[in-house]
Image: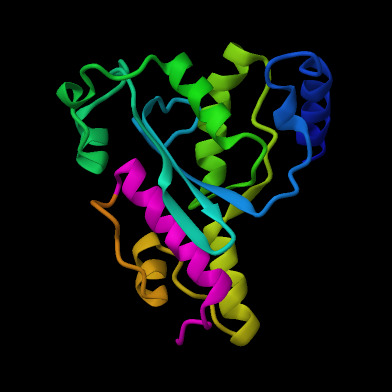
Amino acid sequence: MVLKTIRSATDRWNQKNGDFAWIFEPYTGDEVIALDCEMTSLDPQKAELVSIAAVKIKGTQVLTSEKLDIKLQKPESLSGDSIKIHRIRGVDLLGGEVLGDALKELIQFIGNRPIMGYYIDYDMTVLNRFIRPRFGFSLPNKTIELSHCYLSKIQRANPELTPDLQFETIADKLGVPMVGERHTALGDAVTTALMYVRLLKGPTPSY
């Protein structure tokens, strides 16, 4: 955490006169960005990006009209094992965006808003592996982990419980339908956003 804070401060200084200086400014609004990425590996140091999606949450509303849904050019490490998970084949990525352009589009969409997701640290680690060498900084945004929000809400009412934190289980307990197919970036981003809003304004799920 200390290293991350020092790195963010250094990045902010280095970017103070750059095009992205504004994303290092404190955010004071009521919007959050739900983010999901599909990748070629579960190892964050080896994974390459296949698709990126993000949707805006304003207060307790999911703004599906304000979203980002990007398929990237086929990465070299796309394999049968990863295709079984996200069902994105090489042919599906024909005409996909260049990674650098997609990352710039993502940074501009997110801005300095907090980023929320399911196992969001994994997505952020992979994104920053590609963002830092291209833009000279890592994303400084505050992150919100959906599973931690869910666990906290459950244990406030039932301290003795250790709930199942699988994506599908959380959605089921919250009464949130899956949007699109599981393991599609946009479907998972919107589903995650709906679960987050449900946690903010709904009752505690029963166990």
95 left or right, relative to 104: left
Residue at 43 percent across and 62 percent down: it is: 194
Q: Quadrant of residue 19?
A: top right
Compare residues 101 and 150 and report the one nearer the observer. Answer: 101
When the figure is inspected, residue 123 is found, relative to residue 73, above or below; the finding is: below
Compare residues 123 and 187 and report the one nearer the observer. Answer: 187
Q: Quadrant of residue 94?
A: top left
When the figure is inspected, residue 79 is found, relative to residue 170, above or below; the finding is: above
Q: Position of residue 21 (x, y in %)?
A: 74, 23
Can residue 9 be seen here?
yes
Can residue 159 be seen here?
no
Q: Quadrant of the N terminus?
A: top right
Residue 206 part of the magenta-drawn span = yes
Compare residues 111 and 75 and report the one nearer the observer. Answer: 111
Q: Quadrant of the C terminus?
A: bottom left
* Magenta residue span: 183-207
Main SS, magenta region, reads helix
202 left or right, relative to 10: left
